[in-house]
Structures are given as C-alpha cells and as structure tokens.
Image: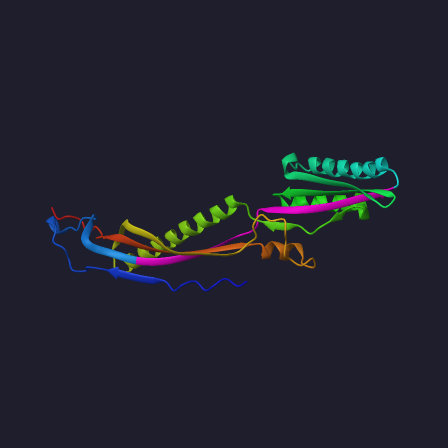
Amino acid sequence: MAPPAPPPSRVFAELDLAPSPAPEGRVEPAALPGREVHVSGSAELSARPDRARVSLRLGSRKEAAVAARSSVSRRLQYIAHTARLHGIPEENMTVTEDFSRVENTYQMEAEVCIIFSDFGKMQSVCNLLIEKLGTSVTINPPHFYHTPEAIDALRRQVCVTAVGNTRRKAQEVCQLFGQALGKPLLIKEEETKEWGGHIDSHLSLSADSQTLQERIQNATAYASCRVFAVFEIKGKENRRSKLP
C-alpha cells in the first residue's frame, strides 16, 4: 500500500524588522514582544515488524497408542532441544497436543508455535528442523507482526521527528532575515496517521508464495505526523566593538 503524500508545509512569520532603540546602540538577544514565527512541519517514518511466529505441525497414526505418542514425543523433544540451543526462551514456545482414535488406529497430533525476535535465528532453526526431520514435520510460513511497544515507539519517534523538522524550518526562516530563533511558545500535534503493519494474530493473510522479504515488507508499519509550532524571534546581538 503506497503511503499518502505528505501534507504541504506551511511557514508563517511575523517579523518586525524596524530597528528597536536600545542603550549604546545595541539590541539585546532577548525576545522582543510580538515577534514570532509560526511554522508547521511533518515527518513520516516506518518500522519493520519486531516479531515472527512460526507454526510447526506433526503427527503419527499407529495401531498402538504408545507407539503413536512416542513417535510424536521424540520429534517434539528434538524441536525443543533445537530451540534451546539457539537461545529461544521456553516462554516463547507453546505446544498443543491432540490424541484421538481413528477407526482401528490411534492418532497423535501436535502443533508447536515459536516466537522469534531474531529473524536470522528463525531461519537457522527452521532450516535445521527441515534438514533433520524432513517431511515428518510441516513448517508453515512465518507470520510477522509488531508488539504494542514497537508501535508506541514508532508513534513517539515520528512526533519527535516532526517537531525537530519544524524547529529547523523556523531556524532557517529566522536566519534568512538575520534573526535568531528563541524559545517555543506553542507546539501542537495537528494530525497523525498510521497504516500498514500486522498485529499479534495467529492468522496471516499473506500468500504462501511470498518470499521472506516480501512478508516483512507487507508487515511494515508506517506513521506520519504534522505539528504546528510558534517560536519567539530574538534580535541578533550587534557584534561591532564599542567605541572608547
């Protein structure tokens, strides 16, 4: 989804360029009453997903219940061992088991969900499991998403960036007229927008044919912010040396 075009920037300046009387022919750098610069600015940032969930399915159907359970249990132990070797915390792995009787056989099925914060480590784990377990395990494509903390960080960062852009714009306007920028009198967040990104959901709408990078790109979140600010304008100090 293409991001919307950023709003046009606006700059309004109230500049009193008439010389102000001051002792000894100087204009002090303190702000003068009624001298302000009004500026609006914007920023747009993006954040790649910070989590990925991988679902693995495995099962076994045997005439004996113990054999069916044992077959799945051995593979589950190997998956857990591999995850631990790669530094995956136990709380980031959940296992769901289902045992049933189908006609004259016993069927054992299991699903393992692993959450990764390191996508390189995710690829290493999946590649090793495919190599060692082969077709006895089905690994679904990863689902990428953002944690609430990552979205909150994106919102704060885009606002702070917009304020910084606005201040730099006001500073350039003042320099154009030979003035110095003073302290802010008002900073107002006028508009924020968010689009794209995936939430923490077990369902992924992405097509299985997508590459890993395409999935990450489709899960990337975007945010824009426009702010309005008012700054004081300070008169520049007269740097000419005083006559004796």
Q: Is residue 11 visible?
A: yes
Front-lying residue, 3 or 244: 3
Q: Residue furthest front?
A: 103
How far from the left and from the top, in percent, is residue 59? 79, 44
Report if residue 215 lies within the magenta region: no
Give the left or right position of residue 213, taking residue 31 as reference.
right
How far from the left and from the top, in percent, is residue 72? 80, 39
How far from the left and from the top, in percent, is residue 102? 83, 45
Give the left or right position of residue 177, taking residue 24 as reference.
right
Quadrant, the N terminus? bottom right
Q: Residue at x 23, y 60 (%)?
A: 14
Front-lying residue, 18 or 3: 3
Front-lying residue, 175 or 152: 152
Q: Residue at x 69, y 57 (%)?
A: 208
224, above or below 93, in the image: below
Q: Residue at x 58, y 49 (%)?
A: 145
How far from the left and from the top, in percent, is residue 91? 63, 36
Q: Residue at x 31, y 61 (%)?
A: 11
Magenta segment, principal secondary structure? strand
Q: Quadrant location of residue 192? A: bottom left
45, above or below 56, in the image: below
User: In the image, which residues are magenta?
Assistant: 39-62
